[in-house]
Each structure stands twice: as C-alpha cells, then as structure tokens.
Image: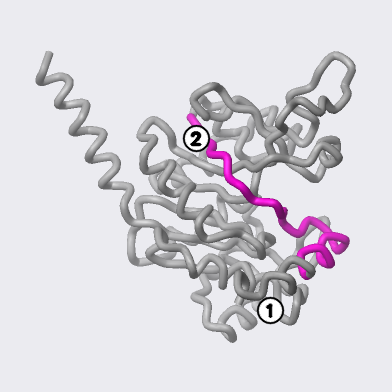
Amino acid sequence: MVLGIQTAINFILRKKKLRSKVLGVIPARYDSTRYPGKPLVMIAGKPMIQRTWEQAMKCKKCDKIVVATDDERIKNVCEGFGATVVMTAYDIPNGTERCNAAQLKLAEKYDIVVNIQGDEPLIEPEIVDAVVEALQQSPDAVYSTACTTLAHEEVKNLGRVKCVTDKDGYAIYFSRGMIPCNKKGEVNPKVQYKLHLGLQCYDASFLKVYGDLPSTPLQLEEDLEQLKCLENGYKIKVIMVDHCAHGVDNPEDVPSVEKIIKENPHLFS
C-alpha cells in the first residue's frame, strides 16, 4: 500500500518536473476573417504584434518566446523589433495547431507550450506565469487557461467567449452564448459571468496529439478549439484572474486599448 502511494507521488513529481521547460508562442495570421492584417495594426505607435511580444517577454516562466506566422510581412516586422520568428504553413486551421507547428520546427524540446494570442496587447505577464503554474500544479490536466469577470453589459456579446467550471476549477464548457443561462434568457446581475481570455497553455506532448483528433460537433458549432479537448475527455484547468481589458477582436476595440496604454505607460513600455 505504501509502495503504491509512493509510486503515485513519484509519478506526480516526475510529471511536474517534466513540465518545467516552457515555450511561449504568439500565433499571428495576416488573413484574419474578421480583421485582416490585425497583427500589424498600429496601437499607440507600435504594431499590435510588437506590443503583445513586449508583454510576453516580461514573463518569468517562459524560457523562450517566438512568433509563429505564415506571412512574410509579419515576419519582417517582427524581426525588425527583435522577435524570433517561426514560419508555419498558411493552411493551419487555428492557433493551437500553429503553436504545435512552431514547437515541431524548433531544435530544442519543451514540456509546456503557451499560446499567447497576438491580439492581446494588454496581456499581463503575471497572468501568463500564473496559467503556466496552474498546469504545472495540475498533473491530471493537459491544458490550462484563464478567465476574468465579464461585465454584465457584455454577456450577450457573441465576440466574448464565456466559460463555466466545476467546483475544483476545471472547465465544464465554453460558449460564445450566455452561460450560465436562466429560463428567461436574461442577464442575472447576481451571477459572476466568466470571460475566457485568449491565453492557453498546453502539455507539449498533448499538443502533438491535438491536431490528430477529429473535429468534434461542439467545437464546430461554437468555433472554439478548446471544446475538442473537453469532448474527448481531457481536463482543462481554469484560473480566475483580475484582468479588466480584453483583446482586439475588431477595429472598434483599438481606441479603448490605446487609451489604456496611454494612461498606463509604465505598464506597457
């Protein structure tokens, strides 16, 4: 009995140790369906991809940060401000699989891969570190991510992805619709709705398997790649963080992001 418990403890310790080396990947496509050229849009004097990279470079948990793109224009801009760029195929369907394509092209191997979405110029490095740590401390999960409180006036916005979790902080579901949803279909001011941030962290071995998993019905219906993990029975650890801003989904988001940067230059220099 003691031997069995010790074996389990040793397995967990090995798993955590194996998850010590971390790669941060910033996927950046030029031909975005909703906002073409988005990575290169100027935000307070710098391309958005540069602002995201500068924030990512402040992370303490990431051993290396790369930009993964399929476009020479993005490559040239990124190399101009000093980023390491990995060129990936044009026809990769989503950011998760682009992250995997990037890790496979690197000579050095990593235990964890963090998907730091290129349209998150306000992402706080402390949040990236916290999501990495959450996966390191959850050996039963292959994926970790972060949510923050969603303003009630934004709950019905289909551009904001929501999440519900179980009592232990593991994801039950993600949706563009309102979740949880009551019988009246109305926003309940007493409910704390969770906004899913575009920050995703994977066990590197699982990431190599993800692309081979067939697309699933809920994934296709919601157009949310993380649902393929849940539908296949994998566990996603979710942490709540204090993050008042969201990514750039469309041109209308740029002024508000610029305003935050200009009001807090010490945080985004």
Q: Residue furthest left?
A: 3
What secondary structure is marked by label 1? helix
Report the residue at 65% width, 77% height from top: 72
Q: Position of residue 226 (x, y in %)?
A: 60, 38
The front one of 87 and 110 is 110
Q: Amino acid at mark 1?
A: Arg
Q: Position of residue 187 (x, y in %)?
A: 85, 28
Residue 154, quarter of picture: top right
Residue 192, quarter of picture: top right
Whether the residues at callouts 2 and 1 have beta carbons within 8 Å, the answer is: no
Report the residue at 57% width, 59% height from top: 124
Report the residue at 88% width, 61% height from top: 252
The residue that mark 1 highlights is 73
Report the residue at 53% width, 39% height from top: 239
Q: Quadrant of the C terminus?
A: bottom right
User: Mark 2 to mark 1: distance in Å?
Assistant: 35 Å
Q: Which residues are magenta?
A: 235-258
The residue that mark 2 highlights is 237
Q: Position of residue 177 (x, y in %)?
A: 80, 32
Q: Residues within 10 Å of mark 1 (few under 14, many from 20)?
A: few
What secondary structure is marked by label 2? strand
Q: Quadrant of the N terminus?
A: top left
Q: Is residue 178 above or below residue 223?
A: above
Q: Amino acid at mark 2?
A: Lys
Q: Is residue 27 left or right of residue 176?
A: left
* Residue 73, visible in the rendered structure: yes
Colour mapping used in the image: one colour
Q: Is residue 234 above or below residue 257?
A: above
